[in-house]
Amino acid sequence: MAKEKKVEQITDMETDFAQWYTDICRKAELVEYASVKGFTILRPYGYAIWENMQNIMDAEFKKTGHVNVAMPVLIPESLLKKEGELVNGFAPEVAWVTMGGSEQLEERLAFRPTSETMFCDHWSRVLHSYRELPMLYNQWCSVIRWEKTTRPFLRSREFWWQEGHTIHETAEEAQHETEQQLNCYADFFEKVLAIPVVRGRKTDKEKFAGAEATYTVECLMKDHKALQGATSHYFGDKFSRAYDVTFTGRDNKLQYPFQTSWGSTTRMIGAVIMAHGDNNGLVLPPKIAPIQVVIVPVAAHKPGVTEKAQELLEKVSALGIRARADFSDNSLGWKCAQYEMKGVPLRLELGPRDIENNSCVAVRRDNGAKTTVSLDELAEQIPALLDAVQQGLYDAALENLEKHIFAASSVEEAKQLQAEHGGFIKTMWCGEEACELKMKEEAGMSSRCIPFRQEKLGETCACCGKPARHMIYWGIAY
RNA sequence: CGGGGUGUAGCGCAGCUGGUAGCGCGCUUGGUUCGGGACCAAGAGGCCCGGAGUUCAAAUCUCCGCACUCCGACCA
């Protein structure tokens, strides 16, 4: 069955999870290291996954009225510095351009680490009236943050993402936008990436530099470490004031708009790898798989096999499914292993025996289950099998999440539970940063979020014993 | 940015008591195979990470860089 080890080039995840992860990134041909430290090349197969993610998300953004724009990659230092908290938050990891050709620049220019400042600068020029609000912008681009240590997808000095930036007439509207986009991310994770998430608010310590509130979707990987999936921020009018973005309101008075931003990155590919992958390689949810179905002809030299496989490819493709057939003269075993390593959700084997029976054999990547499918029922069976893989992945990930949430009533207990099981440890919390620092210091965990779905586990903070204000999730995060 | 590990063919590695390079896989060509990583034969492919030393002679010894990687602190 699927648990058997069939792909030899990949380190077992039980042996060394980090090595397993790196092996998959390289062997599944997702990514290659570039010549500057911390920069990566997204290879065609990896980029195709990102393109599928982009297409689905972009369509969702557009449904709610967002439009795409492109902002410059360089930010003048003076512009970046207008909002103090943002500068302080990002200063350690900004890369600078100081030369233009052979000339020293008058003012150095920052490679964008995020684009709030440029959106604000732009809006300060073009916004005049409440009639022009809301402005619902998004951009797909890469940003640069000079990280100290780097890993493919999870942390690199350049990464690709989308950053949504919006301004609104009222605080309520902006808050609604922040929530709407967080839910958009949550749906994307659960329905498209097949990764269940915990939705919640970040603590003040963990929130985005300059934000009034940061909301997050947190997910759990197979090694029971946490990963922040995507975030959505509410800024109030803080940036508007700092960048002098104003409009004339309905009352004919000058007002500051309320702002949001929200982002998701190629890190989501890392999340998919660590949420679904196994010892045979990558496992991709059908909705984002560049190849959803691979057709492997068996005994292709026998008369009629290649023709029939070609016919099968055409029929499956005609269903709107991303399909490929492998007519190379590699052995059957090689092909099976190859497409397992690349995470193709469904493999169809077609050989002389199948042709005789007017059928093919479908093998699911998630659990290895084999089904005989009549060639007359492809239109019903193949989409159903892809749906089953999508659902199977979600169910397994949900089980992993649910089995790894533990309640604790003291730091000591939290530490023990984390050491023994990993996952999310939930406790009551007083709301003080000192207690977050204590949990980090003594149990090695950071706060992941204050979940929207609160539970009352007790009356007092697990860290200090004072009256509790929230139930909070802790974890070891990527 | 601190602590470890590693840089030799596309990939994985050997060679490290100094004498200018080898194995497996992959690649190319031809043939036989084909229901879970096939086999035979013939090929191609290397400033041994970079720079300075020591030496008649350096992949090998010594310093200094750089990169990758793992573990921490920081962050999407």
Image (cartoon, rainbow, N blue to C red):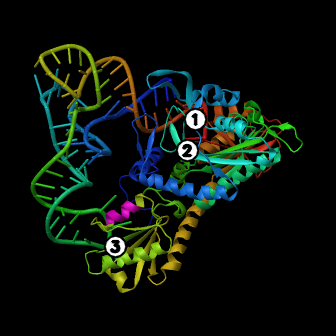
Observer-nearest of A460 and A445: A445
Q: Chain of mark 2?
A: A
Locate residue A113: give its quadrant. top right
- Cβ–Cβ under 8 Å for marks 2 and 1: yes
| Residue corresponding to mark 1 | A112
Q: Chain of mark 1?
A: A
* Label 2 environment density (alpha carbons within 10 Å; few <14, some 14–19, many ≥20): some
| Residue corresponding to mark 2 | A141
Share a chain, discs 2 and 1? yes
Question: What segment is highlighted magenta in the picture?
Answer: A333-339
Return the x and y of residue B14 as percentages of the image width and height: 24, 38
The answer to whether A207 is drawn above or below residue A181 in the figure is above
Q: Is residue A381 left or right of residue A426?
A: left
- The C terminus of chain A is located in which quarter? top right
Q: Is residue A198 left or right of residue B48?
A: right
**Disc sitting over residue A422 in the figure:** none
The residue sitting at 77% across, 32% down in the picture is A241
